[in-house]
């Protein structure tokens, strides 16, 4: 086995990210279409445009490195997208939106970890311009995660409205149960 250095690892990780971002470009329209919340739908649509910019930044970096961005499939992103797709067929309305937010945040956390890693590699390799581009993308991924958290604070309580257990009783955390207990107290 050939002993590869940090530069080869950096390029390999960039190829993985390039694959991940391109997979996300295909998945985001499906997530947007499945969302029942207008805010969530528009968030996915905005992130789609942002993700296209992430791909362009990566292509700029590959051009500077004189490397081909293709040739690797990001299996982690493939799995994360698969989980999000399963939610689309399993849930509906606000509960589906809550599931989509969870899936999207897992994607964002993966991307933040990956961009943080390649940014550190770029810095170590003296690729300051590339590190700056990767930092820009990292910050956008972080902002998207924060927006998803804000949306979750609105959508999760809505998803919890009217939850019933198998016996038909209101679930302990459901809003109707909370309202009922307020009336009794």
Image (spheres, helix red, strand yellow):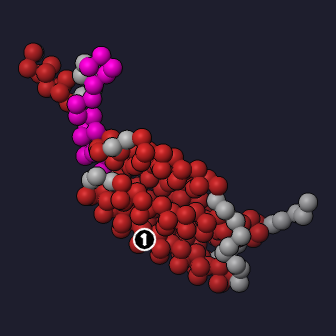
Q: Is residue 132 above or below residue 138?
A: below
Residue 145, how many percent across, how many down?
41, 55
Rendering quarter of residue 30: bottom left
Judge the density around disc 1: few (<14), some (14-19), many (≥20) Cα neighbours within 10 Å.
Answer: some
Q: Image check: 62 left or right of 105? A: right
Indicate whether residue 39 is drawn in magenta.
Answer: no
Q: Residue at x 54, y 77 (%)?
A: 57
Please tell me which residue lies in front, 26 or 140.
26
Q: Image check: 6 left or right of 86? A: right
Q: Residue at x 31, y 22 (%)?
A: 165
Q: Quadrant of the N terminus?
A: bottom right
Q: Residue at x 32, y 59 (%)?
A: 41
Residue 70, how many percent across, how many down?
68, 73
What span is in magenta? 150-168
Please tell me which residue lies in front, 26 or 131.
26
Q: Quadrant of the C terminus?
A: top left
Rendering quarter of residue 67: bottom right
Rendering quarter of residue 15: bottom right
Q: Image check: 28 left or right of 61? A: left
Residue at far front of view: 89
Indicate whether residue 153 is drawn in magenta.
Answer: yes
Q: How many marks?
A: 1
Residue 116 seen = no
Residue 164, how many percent across, how many down?
27, 25
Q: Residue at x 58, y 56 (%)?
A: 77
Residue picked out by circle 1: 50
Residue at far right of view: 1
Tag 1, which secondary structure?
Answer: helix
């Amino acid at each position: 086995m050939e002993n590869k250095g940090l530069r080869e690892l950096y390029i390999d990780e960039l190829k993985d990210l390039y694959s991940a971002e391109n997979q996300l470009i295909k998945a985001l329209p499906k997530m947007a279409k499945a969302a029942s919340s207008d805010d969530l739908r528009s968030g996915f649509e905005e992130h789609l445009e942002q993700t296209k910019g992430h791909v362009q930044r990566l292509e700029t970096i590959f051009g500077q490195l004189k490397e081909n961005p293709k040739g690797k499939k990001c299996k982690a992103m493939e799995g994360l997208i698969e989980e999000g797709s399963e939610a689309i067929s399993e849930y509906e309305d606000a509960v589906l939106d809550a599931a989509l937010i969870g899936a999207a945040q897992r994607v964002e956390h993966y991307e933040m970890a990956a961009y943080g890693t390649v940014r550190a590699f770029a810095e170590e390799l003296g690729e300051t311009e590339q590190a700056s581009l990767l930092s820009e993308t990292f910050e956008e991924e972080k902002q998207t995660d924060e927006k998803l958290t804000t949306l979750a604070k609105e959508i999760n309580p809505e998803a919890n409205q009217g939850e019933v257990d198998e016996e038909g009783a209101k679930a302990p955390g459901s809003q109707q149960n909370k309202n009922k207990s307020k009336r009794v107290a």
